[in-house]
Image: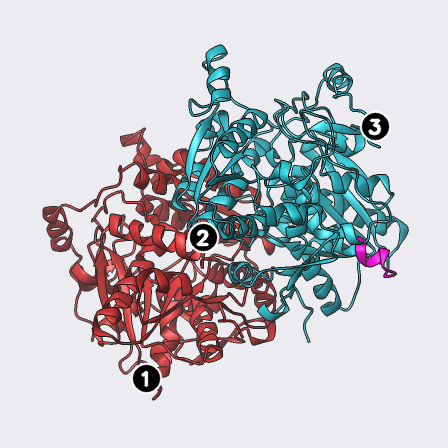
Chain colours: A cyan, B red
Amino acid sequence: MSKQTKFLLNEDQMPKAWYNLQADLPKPLPVVLHPGTMQPVGPDDLAPLFPMSLILQEVSTEREIEIPEPVREVYRLWRPAPLYRAHGLEKALGTCAKIYYKYEGVSPAGSHKPNTAVPQAFFNKEAGVKRLVTETGAGQWGTSLAFAGGHYGLQVEVFQVRVSFDQKPYRRAVMETYGARCVASPSNETVYGRSVLAKHPDHPGSLGIAISEAVELAVQRDDTKYALGSVLNHVLLHQTVIGLEAMQQMEMADTWPDVVVGCTGGGSNFAGMVFPFIGHGLRGGPKPRIVAVEPAACPSLTRGKYAYDFGDTAGMTPLTKMHTLGSQFTPPGFHAGGLRYHGMAPMVSHARELGLLEAVAYKQVECFEAGVLFARTEGIVPAPEANHAVRGAIVEALRCKREGKAETILFCLSGHGHFDMASYQKYFAGQLSDESYDEAELAMALAGLPSVPEPA
Amino acid sequence: MSKQTKFLLNEDQMPKAWYNLQADLPKPLPVVLHPGTMQPVGPDDLAPLFPMSLILQEVSTEREIEIPEPVREVYRLWRPAPLYRAHGLEKALGTCAKIYYKYEGVSPAGSHKPNTAVPQAFFNKEAGVKRLVTETGAGQWGTSLAFAGGHYGLQVEVFQVRVSFDQKPYRRAVMETYGARCVASPSNETVYGRSVLAKHPDHPGSLGIAISEAVELAVQRDDTKYALGSVLNHVLLHQTVIGLEAMQQMEMADTWPDVVVGCTGGGSNFAGMVFPFIGHGLRGGPKPRIVAVEPAACPSLTRGKYAYDFGDTAGMTPLTKMHTLGSQFTPPGFHAGGLRYHGMAPMVSHARELGLLEAVAYKQVECFEAGVLFARTEGIVPAPEANHAVRGAIVEALRCKREGKAETILFCLSGHGHFDMASYQKYFAGQLSDESYDEAELAMALAGLPSVPEPA
């Protein structure tokens, strides 16, 4: 019997319910505040943005939330996703650790994002919504929503940050292939966009502006809603299919992780992988170490403040308590675009405050080094975001080697890098550096956090 | 029980041997001729280019050729590849046909090419070879050999057609990520390359020139061999894992194809899919219709002559009998770069002559239309080459609809289009046309075929 490389589940082993960590948290999540009144929001306050089914998922404390069959039907295009034993990487590192990775790059969009795009599109369709608007930076999320919305016959409009719109036309082509409409942001299609363009006709755009444009359109029309690709509780919930499958696959591999590693931007692939393991531990199961890896250039968990803040730059979204670098903080232009967000998902932040996870930050170049080693030993070229998780796993494997411990390491390889080869090209040309933020700017952004009355 | 979408095999169901159609052919393949003497070549004549193990596979008439365990180990990174039922596409077409597709885009390179790159690298490594040289156009084959060679610690050098080298730097970045060295061809590294550059310093390159450069380097040094990504018998042999798996998966789906469709350039993904079905039929099993789909702009099977011709433009390779447009024929610059070859694999050509398969040619724009419909209904954006197979399957499904026949259609989706979004972008911008060749040029290329003494 040869050593096994891939651990595959059958379609009927795909989870039938998402796992909701809110059911097992020893302390509930802090409330969400209204941007106008600074008072706790109720479901109705969010109704202009999201269908009620998703709002109820956002606040639910049920442990299991059923995955509707029409969602499972689309999931089956790529799920269950494979889990691999990284024999090649282990050998290259000379470690006694066993390294496993869950690979989410098998989805049509090449990342974990469709795990939530599909149910978001489904629940909107169910609620009679005709059009979804969203924002995208590099394009990973926009692609996923385009795919999912297209599947259910929803019109999808994507405000893409202008600099990406111009520099990454191929991503736009993927979105258009799926039938979505892409608009460069800032645009002339919203009041906010026009106001920005009036002042700066050549504005390169930002994720914050694009969010504001999408939100503005969504609240205007009853048949139009907004969709977000990370951060929110219901998004993290949908991603738990990753960890739920991985738990079954670790059993197939006849082992259990001593440490689970993921990369964190908004936090969704990380939460999707680790929440089921954390919950299992909270309910009396084994408690693996949980390690969040973030970019040193945008280190919300390791350098941010745990405080109430806006989700966007313009201050139009509700306020949540999270680890934040300040909504006015502008991360430097490093290549893991999916990790360039000022805040961390409130539920991930909360878990960190409760001591349920650790966080580390690694620099860009060392993460690309890790990604290239991974490509050469395992064959898959990781997305720049996923390189952070690879780096995190390698650091743990080398620690095991030093300590002579045969631990089991599991990490989430959230996506492939086929759309990101320009950054690898720069890496090989020696043109990548460890972009850093300005300490003074960070201090100013943190000082500018909104002051919020302590909730009763 | 919900309808099943994916048909997955376990790792131990992966084929243990490749299938060799030569064992079952009612008439043996025509001999191969030496380019200098025009006499039949023996194994020794090919030894400067390939290791003896691959040469013996090239001429073998054994039905099964064992897949070495170290090759199977690498195959396991992505094999067995999934087979899907195209529920979404069927619904969109309103057809009573059942459509299945075997998806080879799950490989590290995103196409079927690693199926042969891995064993080629392995057998070269076994033979003590240190360096592999090859040519690549768009980059799909170069990427695959870079991946495979890197895995076995072989140095890989890729002569990439200069125009692609300049226009598709991302493909080059993938090859470099896997550790290969890319050289723009024509180059200063070979006598032939220098001779071309002396006359045309700005020569954009061609596949023919790149082959000549790679062959020149390979024959010069004992530790260096040449590798080809299609056309040759041993390449087609390695690809039969596609069809062998698909046969098991059709059994899982409790059906058998009435028609099997594939796209043909050099012929390797097509042969890999259909040869096991053809052989099964020749040995008394059911005989599905076999349909080769080629681009109307480079129609070797439907418009070429079945004659002896060179594999390259310079006339350095052995001559094989095949359907050819003439080695001096220059296909127009359409976007399915993997299908731009003047000749067809000799074994596919031979099967065509024996009446074992049909061939059709479709135009570029109708193939992109098919690909976009496929992306919107099945979620996967196909490579432009694979769009031809999609188009072929759709034509068959619509015929079934007209005729009221609930046939089973199987096709090979040879790769995804993530690296080809520039062509989709042009399609959406209305900038794609049905590139055609010049009839006079084709007539001239056919008139210029080498005259060969009839073998005894």
Q: Are discs 1 and 2 located on one and the same chain?
A: no
- Identify the image quadrant of residue A254: bottom right
First in sequence, mark 3 or 2: give its number.
2
Residue B299 lies left or right of residue B226; in this view the side is left
Report in which chain the residue with disc 1 lies.
B
What is the C-alpha distance between the residues marked 1 and 3?
80 Å
Which mark is on residue A152?
Answer: 2
Report in which chain the residue with disc 3 lies.
A
Magenta residues (range): A278-285
Q: Nearer the viewer, residue B406 or B418?
A: B406
Report the amino acid beneath label 2: Tyr
What is the C-alpha distance between the residues marked 3 and 2?
42 Å
Q: Nearer the viewer, residue A434 or A445?
A: A445
Q: Residue furthest right?
A: A403
Report the amino acid beneath label 1: Leu
**Relative to B438, does residue A159 appear above or below in the rendering?**
above
Crowding near the residue tagged with mark 2, few <14, some 14–19, many ≥20 C-alpha atoms within 10 Å: some
Residue A282 colored in magenta in the image: yes
- Say which quadrant the N terminus of chain B sits in: bottom right
Q: Residue furthest bottom?
A: B284
Q: Which residue is mark 3?
A: A454
